[in-house]
Amino acid sequence: MASDLTNILKSELSNTIEQLLSKKATIKSINKFDISEFSESQAVLIGAKLEFQNISSSWTFIIPTSSGVKFEYLMLGGMGDLKENLDDEISDAIKEIISNVCGSMSTSINAQGFDDLGKVKTEVTTVSIVEANELKTFQNSYKFTLDLEGDELFIVISFDDIIKPYISSITGEVPPAQSDTSTATKTSENGKSTAVGIASHTNGNSDISSILNEHSITNLKLLFDIKLKLSVRLGTKVLLLKDILRWDVGEIIELEQMVNEPLDILVNGVKVGEGEAVVVEGKFGLKVRYIGDAKNRLKKLGLV
């Protein structure tokens, strides 16, 4: 079964908007949108390309005037008056938002290690302000309704056909089945038995019992009470020894990790997921944003 990127898209879209606008953002609904129903006179058009291992997909983010002016207003800290029309400053602000969304999606997808998609690189390719009548050619368009602490705004995303099976929770398109190595036998016309493949798939959220045989589960249970060290990696940087020897109290070391990127979750030094720092009763905590399924975690830890 093809991987579904829906949750990653929803999470990165809401999280990025929340971080950049300093407003809690939630996605209230996602609905198929007929672009002919677009009622505003203008929109900012952001083209983005996602280059996976075997496929290349183009997405178009369509942000109407009402959402665009509010996004820029909040990015500036809510200072001044809301603009009535789109301008280059608003399109630049929206480009920054979408660039961050795409970058965060890339990081999250790559952390998941999807077998059918592999790694991905994303980039914003075009930015423009267009009139509503120029939007009629966009198909496969979906309206994402956002709630920003009481303010209801929306953006539209138009997907190309090739990505539809990988956002099946949005598009409803049935992903193609993928054959595994399971075999069965059939009797041919000459009476001989031959091995044939059986097409099947496993749910990415399968529990341990569904991904291991009974013997493996019994052996694994013997290890369940072993303590493993959990740590969180804030960032990394490659340095020369001479630079490290120059350090003194008060030295500031700039890491390569961006402030809006998720933190790596490590178990015994092995990355198993990503999360974000939170405060829990005065202590640092970690909110898991992405985590591989049980089978992938066991593989990474060398247990299967």
Image: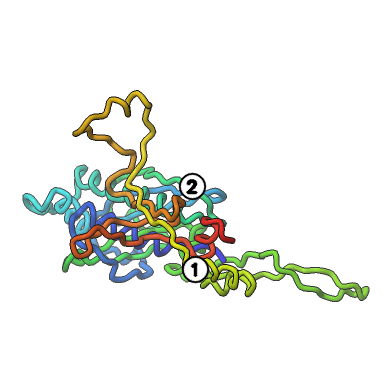
Res 60 visible: no
Near-viewer residue (264 or 43): 264
Res 186 visible: yes
* Distance CA(mark 1)–CA(mark 2): 40 Å
**Residues at marks 1 and 2 touching, judged by CB atoms closer than 8 Å:** no
In the image, farthest residue toward the top: 242
Above-or-below relation of 69 to 210 = above
What residue is at 48 percent from the left and 52 percent from the top? 57
Near-viewer residue (124 or 265): 265
Q: Which residue is mark 2?
A: 51
Left or right: residue 99 versus residue 88 is right
- Sequence order check, earlier mark of 1 and 2: 2
Left or right: residue 268 versus residue 174 is left
In the image, farthest residue toward the left: 80
**Residue 227, image x and y in percent?**
44, 62
Near-viewer residue (213 or 197): 213
Image quadrant of residue 152? Answer: bottom left
Quadrant placement of the C terminus: bottom right
- The amino acid type, in three-letter code, at marker 1 is Phe
**Residue 124, image x and y in percent?**
37, 45
Above-or-below relation of 129 to 276 = above
- The amino acid type, in three-letter code, at marker 2 is Glu
Mark 2 crowdedness (10 Å alpha carbons): few <14, some 14-19, many ≥20: some
What residue is at 19 percent from the left and 54 percent from the top? 21
Secondary structure of the residue carrying numbered label 2: strand
**Residue 19, image x and y in percent?**
23, 54
What residue is at 35 percent from the left and 70 percent from the top? 31
> Which disc, if any, is residue 224?
1
